[in-house]
Amino acid sequence: PDRAVTRPSVSSAYHLACIGTSLRAILEMAGARFTALAVSGLLICGSLNTITMKVAFSMKGTNLDGHQEVFQKPWFITFIMFVAMSSSLLFDKSMWRRKNGLQESLIDASPDAGNYARSVTWGYKVRMVSIPAVFDILATGLCSMGFLYIPASVWQLLRGAEMVFAALFAVIFLQRELFLYHWLGVGLCTCGIILVGMASVWGSGAQADDGSGGGGDVHLLLLGMGLALGGQVVQAAQVIAEEWLLTEVDLPGLQIVGFEGVWGGLIMMAFVWPLLFWLPGTDHGHLEDEREAFSMVQSNAALTTMIALYTFSCATYNMAGIAVTGALSAVHRVMLEAFRTSIVWIFGLSVHYFVDPNSPFGEAWTPYSWIEVCGFMVLMLGQAVYGEMIRLPCCTYPVGAMQPSNMASPGALRNLASPLPPARKQEANPETWASPLPSRAANP
């Protein structure tokens, strides 16, 4: 009788364990597939952001005077980016979920709520997101202006300068300590950027000399690279400001991105657009006239489609970045950036050689393009050394390193992680430094 009772219970437990194991395996498989889908979205939509922007800047529309002109409206594109970011709020369930009371919805249930009530209110957090929005307006505007004058691949590669400026600002303003391998990574990235710039200038001059098409004014090329690098300086400053000011802004990632989009759009309509209209420039006497931008978009269905595709790719890129926050290692992030740059470059080459050699968003292969390839490889190597993905025998590495924060700040989401060197738990004691060679450390 005892066996008759025992056997079913053991069998039931066994079946329940098998079911639990199967469910875990299914959930892990679903999570892996979702992560792969999100990473694919990052790669495809990240490349589309650059390609659609460049294509839009080469298209034409009808202005308010009834004349055709090229759509060179970098600040309008900046506004569209914020519109795309604000759409993230539509997909944040916590924004629309009913809570039990007003106090619970506005005050976080944290032990320090009594001492720091002002810092934990939901409204205060939302208002604090307006600070990175101001940085993002200036940074994206400068980068978009520079994009008018430089090839897409060069513009994409110059984005690597943000890490260089962020590291320097971390030393100056945050009193972070950079180790030898950090400085080597910064130096390699700087050399890579210089090689890319030199190849672009020399290649443009060579195209202009042989009349092969695609060569432009070297002065405008230098202006474009200067504006793009200026944008990277502002974006690095944004990361520093977030480190100072957004430590208590623990809003969900979708809310941070969405409210930055809302703030950015409102600030642009209230202050930036009037300022652009008032400042003198080449856009019918203004630096940029947004009335002309709306007229040109409405007059050209292809341009409207390109703007809509850009909006979709920006929104999808942001949400995919939030979905994989914390799931990607530094190696994955560098590989994604390398693939993204390669896609943009291959697209430009394909347009030039297989579609139209005179296309403004095509890129020709010049005798100096090999230098740009070398610059690209040196830049990726510098990021790998800086992020400790490649450990050099000549360097020592501190142990007890804190992982970079996974806070879904705008700057961190743009890079899929903060570009700042992480704070160290034991950075003052040389005895805790680790050798890059495990056998040497284990057998001194």
Image (cartoon, rainbow, N blue to C red):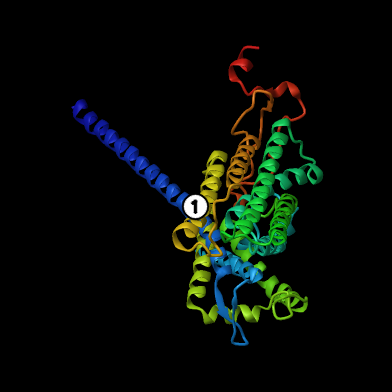
Q: Residue furthest top?
A: 443
Q: Which image quarter holds the C terminus?
A: top right
Count of residue discs: 1
Relative to 269, 96 lies left or right: left
Q: Quadrant of residue 252?
A: bottom right
Relative to 405, 167 lies left or right: right
Relative to 91, 32 lies left or right: left
Nearest to the observer: residue 196 or residue 416:
196
Nearest to the observer: residue 206 or residue 83:
206
Which residue bears the numbered disc 1?
Answer: 346
Residue 120 against residue 417 in the figure, above or below: below
Nearest to the observer: residue 195 or residue 165:
195
Residue 176 against residue 365 in the figure, above or below: above
Q: Mark 1: which secondary structure?
A: helix
Q: Which image quarter holds the N terminus?
A: top left
Res 240 visible: yes
Question: Which x, y percent locates residue 391?
Answer: 62, 28
